[in-house]
Image (spheres, grey):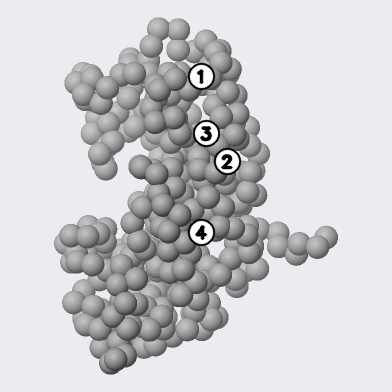
């Protein structure tokens, strides 16, 4: 066997917004574990979300990762470039009566009686909103209507899995989101479907990402099972970096894009060093190369709770900038 890797992970950046420090930390940890464990790494650019992204944005995200010292074995594979397997998966689900087209609007969903309120802008799409004849096998047609996945009712609506970092999980997909969109009105697969189809066809066996995606893992496992894709990937959901208000790092906390620090003359070793400090690897902030990060990372020392990025972190990065 020429390929000595037995496991494979993926780095899956979205090129819609440049990487910020929280993304950098997750990618560094993912990369470091993979290099230590000798998993292979595929870089997959997830460009299906929102308007068409420009090739420069894709190059930009690769450049930022490489600047940090992160490398990969395969890719970049660009998600939008081959939607054939997603269409095939849609055909399979539609034939099996597990997917149906639905033009029910968000407002109609919201006004449906007694919907529970899941977090994160999601509205519950219960079985009462399914169209007549929803369970019949049909062929998949992409005609500008969204398609939804039939989430099983009863105990199967709750998905259990053991997360390697976050521990045992039970995600109640039926009770929180219900039938979720898998094909969008824009004529592209929704994130949930694209991730499952791509993880499977790219041979991904290890998924490491932020813990804001734990609830998505429930949906992805349901799809994985409905498509009969075999052994499920092992998940590691890591706590996020948050702002002082406890919310996930975002523009409202100021500009924490890696490229901005780079532009200010902050060396990559400062960004990596800050991530190392956030991972509990060092007693204080110091410069560190990606190679040293990979050698020293001890996942068991990582904080179990979200890391708060504070003013001192920002000030420290600025203090590392070369004066030019
Ligand atoms: N592209 C997604 C993001 O940047 C990650 C999806 C995943 O890891 O499954 O948030």
Circle nearer the viewer, 2 or 4: 2
Instruction: Sort mark 1 into few (<14), some (14-19) or many (20+) by Cα contacts within 10 Å.
Output: some
Foreground disc of the pair 4, 3: 4
The residue identified by callout 3 is 223
Q: Which quadrant of the structure image shows residue 7?
A: bottom right
Q: Residue furthest top?
A: 132
Find out whether the residues at labels 2 and 3 contact each other: C-beta distance under 8 Å: no
Whether residue 153 is situated above or below residue 132 in the rendered picture: below
Which corner quadrant holds the C terminus? Answer: bottom left
**What is the count of numbered marks?**
4
**Viewer-nearest residue: 160 or 150:** 150
Who comes first in sequence, dot 2 or dot 4? 4
Residues at circles 1 and 3 in contact by the CB criterion of under 8 Å: no
Residue at 49 percent of width and 36 percent of height: 193
The answer to whether 70 is drawn above or below residue 118 in the figure is below
Q: Residue at x 33, y 22 (%)?
A: 126
The residue at which mark 2 appears reads as: 82
Can you tell which mark lies on residue 141? 1
- Is label 1 in a helix, a strand or a loop? loop
**Residue at horizontal 60 percent and vertical 73 percent from the top:** 36
Q: Which residue is mark 4?
A: 11
Is residue 102 rendered to the left or right of residue 236? Answer: left
User: Which residue does the image show at 41% across and 80% down from the upper left?
Assistant: 268
Cα separation between marks 1 and 2:
17 Å
Q: Quadrant of the N terminus?
A: bottom right
Position of 251 with respect to 26 (left or right) is: left
From what the image shows, is residue 62 above or below residue 115?
below
Position of residue 74 measured from the top left corner of the image (x, y, whole percent): 62, 59
* Element on which disc 3 rests: helix
């Amino acid at each position: 066997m020429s390929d000595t890797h037995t496991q494979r992970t993926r780095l899956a950046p979205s090129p819609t917004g440049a990487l910020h420090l929280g993304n950098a930390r997750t990618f560094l940890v993912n990369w470091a574990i993979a290099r230590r464990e000798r998993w292979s790494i595929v870089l997959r650019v997830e460009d299906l979300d929102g308007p068409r992204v420009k090739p420069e944005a894709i190059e930009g995200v690769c450049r930022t990762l490489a600047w940090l010292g992160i490398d990969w074995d395969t890719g970049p594979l660009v998600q939008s470039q081959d939607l054939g397997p997603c269409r095939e998966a849609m055909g399979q689900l539609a034939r099996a009566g597990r997917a149906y087209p639905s033009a029910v609007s968000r407002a109609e969903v919201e006004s449906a009686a007694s919907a529970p309120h899941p977090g994160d802008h999601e509205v519950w799409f219960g079985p009462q909103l399914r169209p007549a004849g929803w369970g019949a096998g049909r062929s998949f047609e992409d005609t500008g209507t969204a398609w939804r996945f039939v989430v099983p009712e009863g105990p199967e609506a709750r998905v259990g899995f053991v997360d390697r970092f976050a521990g045992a999980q039970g995600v109640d997909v039926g009770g929180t989101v219900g039938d979720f969109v898998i094909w969008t009105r824009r004529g592209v697969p929704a994130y949930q479907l694209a991730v499952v189809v791509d993880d499977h066809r790219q041979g991904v066996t290890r998924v490491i990402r932020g813990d804001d995606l734990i609830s998505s893992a429930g949906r992805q496992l349901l799809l994985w099972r409905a498509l009969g894709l075999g052994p499920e990937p092992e998940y590691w959901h890591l706590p996020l970096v948050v702002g002082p208000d406890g919310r996930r790092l975002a523009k409202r906390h100021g500009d924490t894009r890696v490229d901005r620090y780079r532009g200010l003359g902050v060396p990559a070793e400062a960004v990596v060093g800050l991530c190392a400090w956030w991972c509990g690897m060092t007693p204080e902030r110091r410069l560190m190369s990606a190679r040293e990060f990979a050698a020293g990372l001890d996942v068991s020392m990582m904080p179990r709770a979200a890391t708060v990025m504070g003013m001192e972190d920002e000030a420290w990065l600025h203090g590392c900038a070369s004066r030019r």
